[in-house]
Image (cartoon, rainbow, N blue to C red):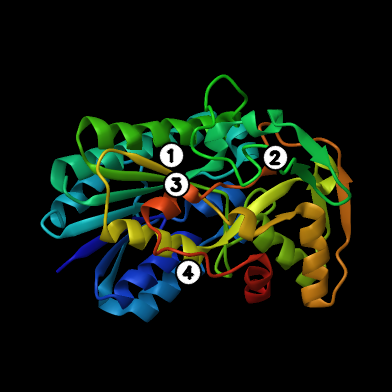
């Protein structure tokens, strides 16, 4: 028996990872206590995904309703399956800038301490396993906002001759800028994942994601902007744009392409705490205004939206991932879906 442990197994990336690995014949241990509902209310609940996985995957999927802040419970799971665990995919997190400021202790304990618990359990019980961490581009704080951005009609852009025009690479500084408390807790976890890889020579990797999205995401106001935007257009829910005139740009990648990247690394892992930026890059990116226009075009409906001139603390004006480091290490991996394909699939 070969076992994959997935935290946040009822969320977007976690649930699709569970289906993917069961489809390959693995047994999957899912760890998820639906804390997303605590963060975002009933609209953020992942209970439906959990029940769907249990029904569809049957005995190949075993669910544990465990809080990753509880090290004793995490240790018990890892000890039970220690002979068989070959891969850990850690997606569980508190994912919102704004929410982190409400409860900084909860945010840090989930994002940083929870990651430490999983790393230590891996080191203690299955040190040869591959450990994949879904980090975030927010580890760069608002450093990208210091780039010489150009305001265009529907988006901010960067000059085509600038070194970061193809996207922001892993060499961007993470130091001495505004991260938001969420960005800080995720950065702490990111550094821990790197350190366990380097110090203990484990197969750990941080994927610093842009906008990861897909049809199974429980999009809410504070997280999952593409999914939530489509929900608002389809259901006639008023939508608010926060700051930057709606011209802020994000690169967007489908959950299936994220999991494909995970599996590509898993098949040929590198030692020592690798870090990769992962997103849609220049192939799949969009501004808020452009996303609204595309959503209206796809659905045939009009969105009732308004502007709030105050941007979120630590939020990016322009962020496109440079994914060349990952594709140079793993040239067999390719992005298969652009932003239009993703939004049509959500619709």
- Tag 4 or tag 1, which sits nearer the N-term? 4
- The residues tagged by marks 2 and 1 sit, at their Cα atoms, a distance apart of 41 Å
Q: Secondary structure at mark 4?
A: helix
- Identify the residue under disc 4: 49
The residue under the point 37% across, 51% down is 329
SS of the residue at dot 1?
Answer: helix
Residue extending farthest top:
176
Q: Residue under circle 2?
A: 161
Of labels 2 and 3, earlier in sequence is 2
Horizontally, residue 271 falls left or right of residue 36, namely left
Residue 322 relative to residue 221: left or right: left
Q: Which residue is nearer to you in this view: 131 or 80?
A: 131
Res. 41 mark: none
**In the rendered structure, are the residues bearing label 4 and label 2 in contact, judged by CB atoms less than 8 Å apart?**
no
- Position of 51 relative to 126 (above/below): below
Answer with mark 2 or mark 1, whichever residue precedes in sequence: 1
Dot label at residue 110: 1
Residue 303 location, quadrant = bottom right
Q: From the viewer's perspective, is 305 left or right of 336? A: right
Task: State which tag comes first along the sequence, 1 or 3.
Answer: 1
């Amino acid at each position: 028996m070969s076992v994959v442990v997935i935290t946040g197994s009822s969320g977007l990336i976690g649930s699709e990872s569970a289906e993917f690995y069961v489809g390959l014949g693995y047994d999957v241990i899912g760890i998820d206590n639906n804390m997303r509902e605590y963060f975002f209310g009933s609209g953020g609940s992942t209970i439906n995904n959990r029940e769907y996985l249990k029904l569809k995957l049957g005995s190949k999927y075993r669910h544990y309703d465990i809080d990753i802040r509880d090290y004793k419970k995490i240790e018990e799971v890892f000890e039970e399956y220690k002979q068989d665990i070959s891969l850990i995919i850690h997606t569980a997190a508190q994912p919102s800038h704004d929410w982190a400021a409400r409860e900084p202790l909860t945010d840090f304990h989930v994002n940083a301490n929870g990651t430490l618990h999983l790393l230590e359990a891996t080191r203690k019980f299955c040190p040869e396993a591959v450990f994949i961490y879904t980090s975030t581009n927010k580890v760069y704080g608002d450093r990208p906002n210091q780039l010489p951005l150009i305001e265009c009609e529907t988006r901010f852009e960067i000059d085509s001759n600038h070194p970061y025009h193809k996207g922001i690479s892993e060499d961007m500084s993470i130091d001495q800028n505004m991260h938001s408390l969420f960005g800080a807790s995720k950065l702490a976890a990111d550094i821990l994942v790197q350190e366990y890889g380097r110090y203990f020579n484990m197969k750990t990797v941080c994927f610093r994601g842009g906008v990861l999205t897909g049809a199974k995401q429980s999009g809410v106001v504070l997280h999952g902007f593409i999914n939530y935007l489509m929900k608002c257009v389809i259901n006639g829910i008023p939508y608010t744009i926060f700051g930057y005139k709606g011209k802020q740009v994000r690169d967007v990648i489908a959950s299936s392409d994220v999991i494909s990247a995970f599996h590509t690394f898993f098949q040929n892992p590198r030692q020592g705490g690798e870090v990769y930026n992962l997103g849609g890059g220049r192939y799949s990116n969009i501004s808020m205004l452009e996303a609204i226009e595309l959503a209206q075009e796809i659905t045939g409906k009009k969105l009732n939206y308004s502007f709030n001139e105050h941007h979120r603390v630590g939020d990016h004006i322009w962020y496109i991932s440079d994914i060349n480091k990952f594709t140079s290490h793993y040239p067999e991996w390719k992005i298969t879906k652009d932003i239009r394909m993703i939004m049509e699939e959500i619709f």
